[in-house]
Image: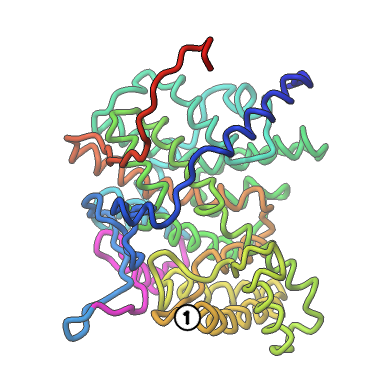
Amino acid sequence: MQINHHVQEEVTRLAELLKTNKKFDEQTYKNADIKRGLRDVDGTGVRAGLTDVSDVIAKKMVNGVLKPCDGELYYRSISVKDMINSYDDENCSGFEEATYLLLFDKLPNKQELADFRALLSEYRNLPRNFVRDVIMKAPGKDIMNSLTRSILTLYNYDKKGIDNSIENVLRQCLTLIAVTPRCAVYAYNAHQHYNEGKSLIIHKQRPELSTAENFLYMLRPDGQFTKLEAKVLDIAFILHAEHGGGNNSTFTTHVVTSAGSDTYSTMAAALCSLKGHRHGGANIKVMEMFADIKKHVKDWKDKDELTKYLAGILSGENFDHTGLIYGMGHAVYSVSDPRAVVFKTFVEQLAKEKGKMKEFKLYRDVEEISTKLIMEKRKIYKGVSANVDFYSGFVYNMLGLPQELFTPMFAIARMAGWSAHRIEEILNAGKIIRPAYVSTNERKPYIPINKR
């Protein structure tokens, strides 16, 4: 879209005017008793609602004192760690099992899981010509934007799009859980073909394959994948499927649902939230940081050299000068992120299969060194640990996934959690979520235009 030069100059001038708008300092927030970012001074989230979908544990009461502990994650009161430790290697349906649990508050038996897989397979079918007319037209470089557009457009194909009855919302949620992987892969294929000049290869989904297996099959030109690749991806989907009601995108799901909006608009809003680099895009920053480390640290095995460079990142001298070691630390967890702890074992298995053990050891050393550096430099005594994003980008890279699909991978999994929360909000509907803001403006007289 061409913009007139004079128009652009005017926009630039007005933007400079915006920069003079009032900015609030920390003291102003304190004076007004505002919980900035809806978080208390100690970092815990302000309680905004109730949920039975999942639970995130980062602190426990010890002798009457609340203390940081190893992180725990529960889906419907069932430990995610236990789910993965008992993983069934035969059917690669861990994500489907987790989705069933999140939605229906019970673990499926073998027949229920088989029926659920078959149901999702039926819902994977997109409307006639949808791929051609929606996904392939005006392909974008940002797959999250393309995915959001696809989800919103599906509303137009749904004769009961605005029906918010539980049965209809469940149908819509199951549809979106099923089609999101296809929409993401096809959006990437379209981008590669039309924007990058690559060959266009489109695989239809195979009904006998699981979500993780189908994703790898559809993405790869030859449709081939190993059993371990599918297993690791399936576990990644389990770990990303849900993480409490307070994370930004899930809270967005509750907020939009409480307004009475439809399922497609609600999920599109959640996708827009997840796209942000402070939320779903963190693993990309981890990958970029490691590329920078590999470029500047000559001997990866030399911990002194590695420590010196990481200290430079922390001080803002190296990498992107933000002073952040990406993938380290979490808004809730301090001692450990249970997702990262569980994932790490499978990351090592995949690294062995891919001949990437040298890189895996680099990740492990960066995690160990960074933990000590951050605690020393930032005076953090509660503990700091690697979060799930620290390893997920490395896994996706070993699986041959392009960075354009890293955040969509998160979205594919989290669609399950968002669906459970949307249904929970509808079942407990009553009030629109509307927090209060404190106004700081001072009254001014209106001045007629000829006197300004």
Where's the N terminus, which quadrant? top right
Residue 3 shown in magenta: no
The kind of residue on which mark 1 rests is Lys
Q: Residue at x 52, y 84 (%)?
A: 376
- Counting from the top left corner in percent of width and height, residue 22 is at 48, 41
* Helix, strand or loop under label 1: loop
Judge whether 436 appears above or below 54 on screen: above
Q: Depth check: give the residue in front, 340 or 5.
A: 5
In the picture provided, is 294 more to the left or to the right than 398?
right
* Residue on which disc 1 sits: 379
In the picture provided, is 208 more to the left or to the right than 302?
left
Magenta stretch bounds? 66-91
Q: Quadrant of residue 85?
A: bottom left
Q: Depth check: give the residue in front, 53 or 39.
A: 39
Is disc 1 surrounded by few (<14), some (14 to 19) or many (20+) residues within 10 Å? few
In the picture provided, is 413 more to the left or to the right than 292?
left
